[in-house]
Image (tube, rainbow, N blue to C red):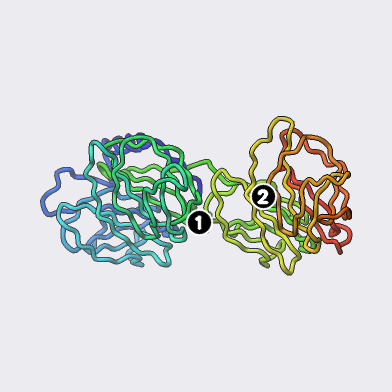
């Protein structure tokens, strides 16, 4: 899913009025339509298909319609019409060939959907009559690899506006009062916030079709949301964007694994091999379900693969943990709330595969973090900003297995300390500790 941000719907309506006021050679609209006609609009949402021509009963009716564009409404004689789609300027191949029964005085939108190899068409009957005391909105899902979604108000647990909308489905129009709304997208049946849009202003008398299109997996055709104005000519639209991202850090914590490449939706994001125990720092990632792969550097050998859901404006750490033969991802949501004055926040994670449960103590034996086993983590915990001499002890004992002298915790900073390496290791693989400034 790429970035979305709701522009003022008032601006959308103004754009529609401006476009209607202008002459349009490509999308003429005759307001004095004769009896016996229907109106048909085509929206091209097949992300990897070229620009196309639309044929009606063997003649080109709409020429050179590009991905993401709409033809606007055109008059078509009522009855059963043959609709074909071909690449612009060509008579073949015919990629869509459907017979549509169009009723007199009704209006329709034909959506070219799916990737080119599986291109097809879905058709909606449009209720464009405006309500002067309400706004009308519907949702159409044309992103083939996006899951079914719910759309809610204000938060992931807020009241539902649209529920369980899968690919190739459209909702009925709903009527809403004029006002400002915050819409949130979640996977169907979940409170997890995948996308949170900026507040939008909805105006009475406006009719909108919100189209989710593109793909989550092909960065050349990213997931996007486009709002089409159904009033007037039906050819005005505005893209919805947001600057909200998730922040994701990947940490190489597998002591015997080689340097690795990190792939996000199959694109390598690190410029050099990530070696144990280094990290990427926080990377901005589009919210939603992202495919994460960890490959041996410079190869296609994948040692970790996971589909992870990231929420906008949240922070995550992904640790590659355990020995190479058992390597696995360990994911944490990072609470980066600023510490109080004079404090630092510290989190401890036990990531030494062959080490027993441990305590983190002061040199006098006072326990700071007690009894943590492999893969267990503390919350971020406030400590006084100071320099500490810490020790790692076998849990519940005075046996020191690792000294950690001179740990500087600065006022206002946030840290992750993790036990790394192997008790049986030597050199860079020996038991130790790594500190990350989050």
Q: Which residue is mark 1?
A: 216
Q: Quick one: 177 or 226, which is closer to the camera?
A: 177
Please identify the quarter of the rendering in which residue 95 is found. Answer: bottom left
Q: Position of residue 151 (x, y in %)?
A: 41, 49
Q: Tell whether 217 sits left or right of 19.
A: right
Q: Secondary structure at mark 1?
A: loop
Q: Count numbered badges in the picture.
A: 2
Residue occupying the point 63% across, 58% down: 263
Q: Report the disc number at residue 51.
A: none
Q: What distance separates the C-alpha of mark 2 from that of mark 1?
A: 20 Å
Residue 273 visible to the viewer: no
Residue occupying the point 43% across, 45% down: 158
Counting residues from the N terminus, which is met first, the one under dot 2 or under dot 1? 1
Q: Quick one: 376 or 435, which is closer to the camera?
A: 376
Q: Tell whether 40 sits left or right of 372.
A: left
Vertical placement of residue 144 versus 417, above or below:
below
Q: Which marked residue is nearer to the observer: mark 2 or mark 1?
A: 2
Q: Report the disc number at residue 249.
A: 2
Q: Position of residue 386 (x, y in %)?
A: 81, 35
Q: Residue furthest front?
A: 396
Q: Quick one: 61 or 350, which is closer to the camera?
A: 350
Q: Position of residue 99 (x, y in %)?
A: 24, 66
Q: Residues within 10 Å of mark 2 (few under 14, many from 20)?
A: many
Residue 202 visible to the viewer: yes
Q: Position of residue 134 (x, y in %)?
A: 27, 39
Q: Residues within 10 Å of mark 1 (few under 14, many from 20)?
A: many
Q: Secondary structure at mark 2?
A: strand
Asked if disc 2 and disc 1 are in contact, CB closer than 8 Å, the reply is no
Residue occupying the point 50% across, 56% down: 216
Q: Quick one: 163 or 168, which is closer to the camera?
A: 163
Q: Residue furthest left?
A: 35
């Amino acid at each position: 899913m790429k970035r979305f941000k709701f522009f003022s719907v008032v601006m959308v309506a103004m754009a529609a009025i401006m476009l209607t006021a202008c002459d349009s050679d490509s999308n003429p609209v005759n307001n004095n339509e004769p009896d016996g006609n229907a109106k048909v609009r085509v929206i091209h949402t097949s992300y990897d298909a070229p620009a196309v021509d639309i044929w009606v009963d063997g003649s080109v009716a709409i020429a050179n319609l590009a991905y993401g564009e709409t033809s606007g409404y055109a008059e078509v004689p009522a009855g059963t019409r043959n609709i074909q789609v071909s690449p612009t300027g060509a008579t073949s191949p015919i990629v869509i060939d459907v017979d549509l029964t169009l009723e007199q005085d009704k209006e329709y939108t034909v959506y070219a959907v799916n990737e080119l190899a599986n291109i097809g068409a879905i058709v909606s009957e449009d209720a464009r009559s405006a309500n002067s005391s309400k706004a009308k909105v519907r949702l159409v899902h044309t992103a083939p690899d996006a899951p079914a979604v719910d759309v809610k108000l204000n938060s992931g647990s807020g009241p539902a506006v649209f529920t369980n909308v899968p690919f190739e489905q459209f909702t009925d129009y709903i009527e809403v009062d004029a006002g400002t709304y915050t819409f949130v997208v979640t996977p169907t049946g979940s409170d997890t916030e995948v996308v949170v849009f900026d507040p939008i202003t909805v105006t009475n008398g406006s009719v909108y079709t919100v189209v989710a299109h593109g793909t989550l997996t092909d960065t050349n055709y990213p997931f996007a949301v486009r709002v089409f104005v159904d009033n007037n000519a039906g050819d005005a639209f505005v893209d919805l964007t947001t600057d909200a991202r998730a922040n994701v850090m990947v940490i190489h914590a597998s002591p015997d694994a080689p340097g690795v490449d990190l792939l996000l939706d199959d694109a390598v994001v690190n410029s050099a091999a990530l070696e144990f125990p280094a990290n990427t720092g926080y990377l901005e990632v589009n919210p939603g379900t992202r495919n994460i792969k960890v490959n041996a550097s410079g190869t296609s050998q994948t040692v970790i693969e996971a589909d992870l859901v990231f929420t906008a404006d949240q922070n995550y750490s992904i640790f590659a943990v355990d020995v190479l033969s058992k390597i696995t991802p360990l994911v944490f949501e990072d609470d980066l709330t600023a510490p109080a004055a004079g404090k630092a926040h510290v989190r401890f994670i036990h990531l030494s595969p062959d080490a027993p449960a441990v305590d983190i103590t002061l040199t006098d034996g006072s326990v700071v973090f007690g009894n943590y086993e492999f893969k267990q983590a503390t919350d971020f915990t406030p400590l006084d900003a100071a320099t500490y001499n810490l020790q790692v002890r076998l849990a519940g004992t005075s046996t020191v297995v690792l000294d950690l002298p001179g740990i500087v915790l600065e006022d206002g900073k946030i840290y992750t300390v993790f036990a790394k390496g192997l008790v049986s290791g030597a050199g860079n693989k020996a038991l130790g500790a790594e500190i990350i400034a989050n």
